[in-house]
Amino acid sequence: MTDKTAAELRAAFAAGIGGGHPSPWREAFRAIPREAFVPVFHRQDQAGQWAPVTASDPGYLEAVYSDTALMTQLDANGIPTSSSSEPGLMLDMLDALDAHPGDTVFELGTGTGYNAALLCHRLRADHVTSVDVDPDLVALAARRLGDLGLTPFVTAGDGALGYSARAPYSRIIATAALRCIPPALMEQAAPGAVIVAPIGHGVIRAVVTEPGHAEGRFLSRPALFMPRRSDGRGPDFDILRNQAPQATGLPVADALSRWKFPLSLALPGYSSCTWRDDDGTLTAVGLWTEDGSTATASVNGHVRQTGPRKLWDTVEELAALFPQGPPAREDFGITITSAGQRIWHGHPAGPTWTLPTASEVQR
């Protein structure tokens, strides 16, 4: 049992998240009970097993009112599929959204409904539209919102398609990781609309300057959101055994972690793994993308690659471009046009990485 009430914990939580900087959203965090949207979450133990935590468990309220992401849904294999995001990150994204009463907001990824509740508190519920691909999550979120007297428009569907019947939107926010800004959202954005969305291991804030065109930069804060659900190809490590090795001079042991952020932009949606010997010493790393491209790099400097993209070549290109490690996230920007979307470093004419098209993401 806690010796503080939920209201006391919530007040301290609302005042302190994000370092306590001034924000018009703090009143929403103070008013909306997070526990209403996270009656149960899952905590991982040292063995990697997930166990449910409910209001009857010690420390439940303290965890709910900590600046921590909480896993709220697991699939049949025990893999997390939905979470209540880190509140400090939510605050930063809402600040970046710069929504005011009168703005109409589209949210991609309803999740627990907590973020929609915050939007409803500051704006008007009838100005908030939220879409999630999981109908069970949508039903739960709608019920929990309704229990608090909040009635935004919440529906199940592909959030990447937006919801044209309620467009245009002056503000668009995504709470699921994207590979690019979905074209449908650009089409449904009002002139001057602000778009805040996770791409790679960061969050972009872009402003629609004219139909089909937007420019922006990444926020300084790291971010890692649940990806949109899709069926992608796994790694093809077996075929690599027949590939002739090439040499690499990169420090394999920390290459993927050192350039993790620019790698998430240059290879959207990539996955990685490691191999270790019986003593736990790293022996090799693996890297793959959903188009079937696969690479392994061993600590002895041997690299093998297969598929339409040479993934380790991209790692080496980033290492050459950023020899001291990746620069600040806010040094990266995005340009969105009807012809395509690209990430750039420094300024729009700087080093550039093309984001996949919506059709490539959906394959």
Image (cartoon, grey):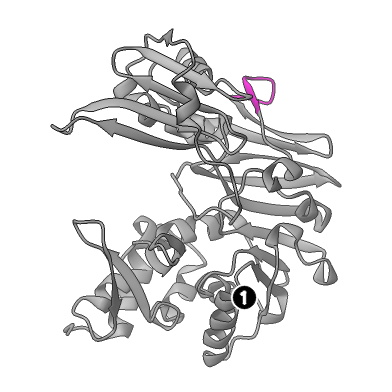
Question: Residue drawn 47% across and 22% down?
Answer: 240
Query: Whole-percent x and y of residue 135?
Result: 62, 75
Q: Is residue 118 above or below residue 306?
A: below
Specify the farthest residue to the left.
279
Seen from the viewer's position, the closer of residues 13 and 241 is 241
* Chief SS of the magenta region: loop
Residue 60 visible in the shown view: yes
Q: Position of residue 73 (x, y in %)?
A: 43, 69
Residue 65 in sight from this viewpoint? no
Q: Residue at x 22, y 81 (%)?
A: 57
Amino acid type, mark 1:
Pro
Residue 102 position by quadrant: bottom right
Label 1 environment density (alpha carbons within 10 Å; few <14, some 14–19, many ≥20) = few
Q: Quadrant of the C terminus?
A: top right
Give the camera-side residue of 134 and 305.
305
Q: Residue 45: give x, y in percent of width and height.
A: 21, 61
| Residue linked to disc 1 | 135
Above or below 270: residue 57 = below
Which quarter of the figure has residue 319? top left
Quarter holding residue 342: top right
Q: How many marks?
A: 1
Q: Quadrant of the N terminus?
A: bottom left
Left or right placement of residue 144 versus residue 79 in this view = right
Q: Which residues are magenta?
A: 346-353
Q: Is residue 333 above or below residue 165?
A: above
- Indicate whether residue 303 is drawn in magenta: no
Regarding mark 1 in the picture, which secondary structure is present there? helix
Q: Is residue 45 left or right of residue 340?
A: left
**Residue 198 vs residue 149, the one in the foreground:** 198
The residue shown at (13%, 32%) is: 279
For the residue pair 355 and 27, the one nearer the viewer reads as 355
Position in image of residue 310 (x %, y %): 56, 20
